C-alpha cells in the first residue's frame, strides 16, 4: 500500500535538542541590540519594481480585415486586450491541465499495477461524502474518470484556441498572463511527476489546479459577458460547469483517501 510513512527525519528541532539550544543561545548572544534597518534593502526592491518592464505583451491581431469584421474591434466594454490576455492564460492553463492529468494517469496506473488493486476510494466511500452529485463518476472506473477529465481539459484548450482565432488573435502566442500562470503552476507538475509522491499528494496538487481553474473560468465568462460575446459566454460557462465537476471529484477522492489512510496508517 502506498503510504506516508514514519522514518528518519531530522528536519525538526526536536531531533537535536542540544543543537537547538545552542542556536537559541547564539541568537540571544549575537543578535544586534536594536532591530536591523531593512529600509535600504526595501528601497532597492522598490527601485527594481518601478524600473521593471512588463512580462511580455499581447501581439496585435494579424488580420485587420478579420478584426474589423468579427474580431476584437467589436468587443464592448473595458479593455479587449485584457480579455485576449486572459484567454491566452486559459489556453496555457488547459494545456497544462491536460499534461497534469496525463501525469496523474501514469502515476495512478503505475501504483495500481504495483499494488494490484485500485488505489482510488471505492464508490461507496465516495457516496458517503457530503457531495452526492458525483453521478458521472459512479458509472466509471477511476481510470475512466481520469481519462474523461483529461479529454475535457483538452477540449477546453481546443475551444479556447478557436475563440482566440475568432477574435483575430494568435492562439500560439504566449500572452503575459499565460507566462505568469505557467510560472505559478510549475510546482504542480513537479509534484505530480515526482516518482516519490503518493497519489494523495498528487491529488492535493490537482486540487490547487482545479480551484484555480474554476476561478479562472468564472472570470473569463464574466469578461466575455462584459465584452458582449454571448456565444463565448455560453461556451465558457459550459466549461466552468465541467470544471466544477472536476473539482468535486478531486476533492472527494482526496478527502476519502486521506481520511481512510488516517484511520489505518501514519499519514
Ligand atoms: Fe479541470
Image (cartoon, grey):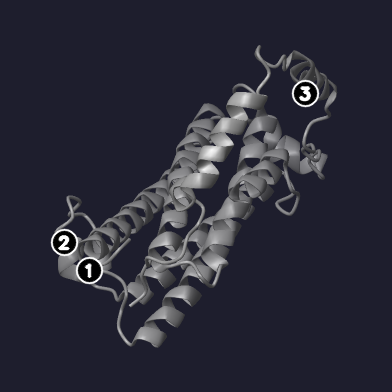
For the residue pair 130 and 61, the one nearer the viewer reads as 130
Residues under numbered marks 1 and 3 in contact, where contact means CB atoms less than 8 Å apart: no
Task: Look at mark 2 in the image and give the residue it sits on.
Answer: 127
Residues at marks 1 and 2, CA–CA distance in whole angstroms:
9 Å
For the residue pair 107 and 232, the one nearer the viewer reads as 107
Task: Look at mark 1 in the image and give the residue it sits on.
Answer: 138
Inspect this view and state whether residue 76 appears: no
Of circles 1 and 3, which is in front?
3
Image location (x, y in percent) of residue 194: 56, 67
Residues at marks 2 and 3, CA–CA distance in whole angstroms:
51 Å
Image location (x, y in percent) of residue 3: 36, 70
The first of marks 1 and 2 along the sequence is 2
Q: Which residue is drawn at 36% across and 49% down?
A: 244
162 vs 212: above or below: below
Of circles 1 and 2, which is in front?
2
Task: Look at mark 3 in the image and give the residue it sits on.
Answer: 45
Q: Say which element carries label 1.
A: helix
Q: Which residue is drawn at 58% across and 25% down?
A: 28
Identify the image quadrant of residue 201. bottom left
Image location (x, y in percent) of residue 27: 60, 29
The first of marks 1 and 3 along the sequence is 3
The quadrant in which the N terminus is found is: bottom left
Amino acid at each position: 500500500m502506498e503510504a506516508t510513512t514514519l522514518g528518519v527525519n531530522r528536519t525538526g528541532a526536536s531531533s537535536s535538542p542540544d543543537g537547538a539550544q545552542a542556536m537559541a543561545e547564539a541568537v540571544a548572544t549575537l543578535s544586534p541590540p536594536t532591530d536591523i534597518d531593512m529600509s535600504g534593502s526595501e528601497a532597492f526592491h522598490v527601485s527594481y519594481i518601478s524600473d521593471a518592464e512588463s512580462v511580455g505583451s499581447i501581439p496585435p491581431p494579424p488580420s485587420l480585415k478579420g478584426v474589423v469584421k468579427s474580431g476584437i474591434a467589436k468587443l464592448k466594454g473595458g479593455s479587449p486586450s485584457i480579455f485576449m490576455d486572459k484567454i491566452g492564460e486559459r489556453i496555457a492553463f488547459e494545456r497544462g491541465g491536460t499534461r497534469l492529468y496525463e501525469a496523474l494517469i501514469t502515476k495512478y496506473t503505475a501504483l495500481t499495477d504495483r499494488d494490484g488493486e485500485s488505489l482510488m476510494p471505492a464508490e461507496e466511500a465516495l457516496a458517503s461524502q457530503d457531495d452526492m452529485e458525483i453521478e458521472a463518476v459512479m458509472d466509471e472506473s477511476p481510470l475512466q474518470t481520469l481519462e474523461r477529465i483529461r479529454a475535457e481539459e483538452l477540449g477546453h484548450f481546443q475551444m479556447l484556441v478557436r475563440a482566440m482565432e475568432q477574435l483575430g488573435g494568435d492562439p500560439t502566442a504566449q500572452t503575459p498572463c499565460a507566462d505568469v500562470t505557467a510560472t505559478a503552476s510549475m510546482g504542480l507538475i513537479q509534484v505530480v511527476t515526482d516518482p516519490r509522491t503518493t497519489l494523495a499528494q498528487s491529488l492535493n496538487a490537482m486540487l490547487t489546479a482545479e480551484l484555480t481553474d474554476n476561478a479562472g473560468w468564472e472570470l473569463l465568462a464574466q469578461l466575455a459577458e462584459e465584452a458582449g460575446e454571448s456565444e463565448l459566454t455560453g461556451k465558457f460557462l459550459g466549461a466552468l460547469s465541467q470544471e466544477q465537476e472536476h473539482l468535486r471529484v478531486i476533492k472527494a477522492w482526496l478527502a476519502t483517501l486521506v481520511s481512510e489512510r488516517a484511520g489505518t496508517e501514519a499519514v
